[in-house]
Image (cartoon, rainbow, N blue to C red):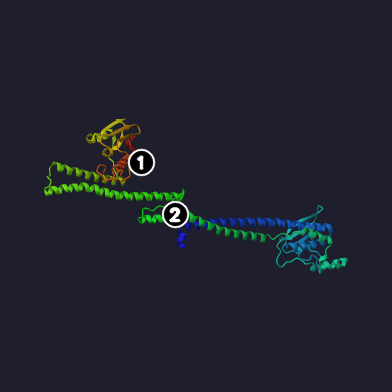
Amino acid sequence: MFSWAFSLQGRLTLGFALVLALSITSVSVYSAYATRVETERFASEIELARTERAEQLVKDTFEANQDWDEVQYAVQQVGNLFGWRVAFESDSGLIVADSHELVRNAQGLLETFAERYARPTRFTKRPVFVNGELIGYMLVDEQPSRKERPLSMQEFFRSPLSQLLNEQGPRQTLPPTQVSSQATGDLVAEVLEFVDPPLSNLQASFQRSLLIAGIAAGFAGLLIVMLLTRQALAPVRNLTAAASSLGAGDLSQRVPESGTDEIGKLGNTFNTMASDLQLAVDQRRQLTADVAHELRTPLTNIQGYLEAIKDGVVEADEETIDTLHTQTIHLSNLIEDLRIFAIADAGALALNKSHGSPVPVIQDSVAHFSQRAREREIDLSISATGTETAVDFDETRIRQVISNLVENALTHTPNGGSIGVEIFGNNDNVKILVADSGTGISETDLPRIFDQFYRADQSRNRATGGAGLGLTIVKRLVEAHGGEISVTSDADSGTTFHVLLPASRT
């Protein structure tokens, strides 16, 4: 479980869960806040509408009956229905109706507002007009104390007011629920017949539904993201397994193609890396075999001649000494190539640059091969234009570049062929072309001709031998001068190497 939590899928899932939780929480908090605000606003509107209905009831009751006793009945109904304490103050300042307390004492006297209520600020006061004339003020306390409760009609019937009413006539025979006139009862039913829904229940129901929906959405979201991340990260798991096998030495490991997205590109990069690594290992093995062979051949020859001289089989004459000298030079050149390659590969190749035209150095380097070319009836030519172009170059390394290219051309050009070296100078660079009429390079080998240890001819024939370091060293030396080298080849017309050396800006 803990390992899954620290895996990429676990972190993505937990991150999504956190974002989802924050989103749902934010939406829930905002929705609850907005609902509460809207509910309070709606409740205020309802309370205002209730107050207006209660005021309208009082007005209509008084206008229809011109009797404060009928108003008392009306405010009692309002108090019972809305849970308010409602009173009415006449224009003379006397409390003539109260939903929670009888307004007349045993002597039938009315009290003033200040005399009757110890906390007058608890009421909101609204003027009531009938036909444009002020008849008094309706007093409303929307949150009366728990000890207070509206008067029942039985209490009203047993009150001193009821006794006063009984003394006035036939209304004494009415039952408690019919103390008021029929007109007042009709007004109460008409004005107060609409009962408002409890908004607290609506708000609680909404928040409960929002919570259930949020939890369901959270679980569904987590399930979906787990499935999606599992599928999306399958290439990563394959890549991890392949990398582990690759690290254990299985260089044949590859991962399946998985699209063009970032993970797909990572898989393609891994495959390319694995191929390059396998190629590098194969090249290293090939290098080991080639170097062992190249070193063994001259060493074997030198050892054989020395043993023959020691045994008296061969005399140490000039011809024998020349043969030993040739083999020693070949061995020295091979070791020097390995040394230069190692230095260039480490990026530690130092150049002793001079400023001037490289044309004389190139011409002199080519001239050293004239005798060999004549012996094989190969036409070796050199031409130059723009000889005044100056570059910053290391004379020894440029000689090595030209020598390797001409040597490579002589190696692959048959007798009677031709090799041409052309030099073009301009304000931007010096371009050197080394073209031969040899066998050419196949399209398969051409992109890798400069790779280290790579040989187009895999044989160990001395005619084409070498460890495959010559062109690699040439490329490193040209690039060390800030230049570029490329090659074009045709199986029918030979090969041409293009070398560009940047012109000096000073």
Identify the mark at residue 443; answer none if there is no mark.
1
> Is any part of residue 95 visible from this angle?
no
Residue 78 position, x and y percent, is 76, 61
Residue 350 position, x and y percent, is 29, 43
Q: Label 2: which residue?
A: 236
Q: Nearer the viewer, residue 68 or 275?
A: 275
Query: With 395 as the anchor, is 153 left or right in this view?
Result: right
Q: Nearer the viewer, residue 6 or 308?
A: 308
Q: Residues within 10 Å of mark 2 (few under 14, many from 20)?
A: some
> Is any part of residue 259 visible from this angle?
yes
Number of numbered callouts drawn: 2
Q: Residue at 67% x, 57% y: name it.
A: 40
Query: With 193 as the anchor, is 447 left or right in this view?
Result: left
Q: What is the three-letter code of the residue carrying label 2? A: Val
**SS of the residue at dot 1?**
loop
**SS of the residue at dot 2?**
helix
Q: Residue at 22% x, 35% y: name it.
A: 375
Q: Residues within 10 Å of mark 1 (few under 14, many from 20)?
A: few
Where, quadrant-wise, is the C terminus in this rendering?
A: top left
Residue 369 position, x and y percent, is 24, 36
Q: What is the three-letter code of the residue carrying label 1? A: Glu
